[in-house]
Image (cartoon, rainbow, N blue to C red):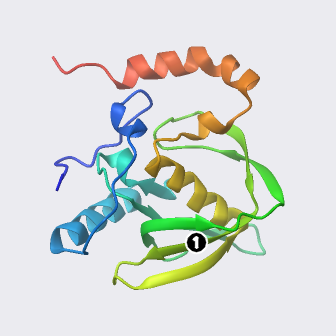
Amino acid sequence: MQHPSDYEIRYYGHPDLRKKAKLVGKLTPEILEICEKMLEKMLSLSHCIGFAGPQLGVNLRIFVIREEKFLPDGGYYFAEPEVIINPVFSQPSQELETMTEGCMSLPGIHVEVTRPKSMQVCYLNLKGEAVEEKVEDFRARMFMHENDHLNGVLHIDRMDPKKRKEIEPLLREMKKRYNRPLV
């Protein structure tokens, strides 16, 4: 079992971001500790609403999220953080929605991504209970974005190819800036 020592964010260009994550077997104390560390990392960053294992060097099918809930006055709060283990998606809606997405592994890169508006998902929660849920709207987008990370896919892989070409110089710069070898 791989157990990272740092839980540092992997940035664009890091090979961990392109690995397909492995299924979690039993919820052992070690797995629960990994989940706790992932939650801690997410909660330590005020602007972070989710992390997938590969973004933190954890090659397991785990992601953590905290959904933003909006108030009538324009304010918002965060819902209770959640741990999603071994998600399996099905029944994507025919209705699609395009929204701007950002990613902690690609700071400052916000791109338009089209995704199904809703989808069924089955997963294990932190108690090891199987959960089946229809996720919709922004919650569905969060689940699909984080699940992409578990498959080695980044949000920039889902953007319009012409627009992707436009940001290539930024991506090359990011690769250099964040992935320098240690001296």
Q: Is residue 131 above or below residue 49?
A: below
Quarter of the rendering occupied by the N terminus: bottom left
Quarter of the rendering occupied by the C terminus: top left
Q: Is residue 105 above or below residue 86?
A: above
The number of numbered discs placed on residues in the rendered structure image is 1
Badge 1 crowding class, 10 Å Cα cut-off, few under 14, some 14 to 19, many 20 or more, is: some
Q: Is residue 34 above or below residue 156?
A: below
- Percent position (x, y) of residue 34? 25, 63
Residue 22: image quadrant is bottom left
**What residue sits 36% from the left and 47% below the top?**
54
At label 1, the amino acid type is Val
- Report the front residue among 88 and 7: 88
To which residue does mark 1 refer? Answer: 121
- Report the front residue among 79 and 105: 105
- Percent position (x, y) of residue 14? 36, 30
- Percent position (x, y) of residue 10? 36, 38
**What residue sits 57% from the left and 62% below the top?**
143
Residue 130: image quadrant is bottom left
**What residue sits 52% from the left and 58% below the top?**
49
Q: Please give left or right for residue 3 compared with residue 164 in the image.
A: left
User: Would residue 167 be visible to someone looking at this image?
Assistant: yes
Q: Please give left or right for residue 31 compared with residue 118 in the image.
A: left
Q: Is residue 180 above or below residue 144?
A: above
User: Would residue 47 be visible to someone looking at this image?
Assistant: no
**What residue sits 52% from the left and 41% below the top?**
153
Please identify the residue farthest to the right as the structure is shown.
95
Query: Element type at marker 1?
Result: strand
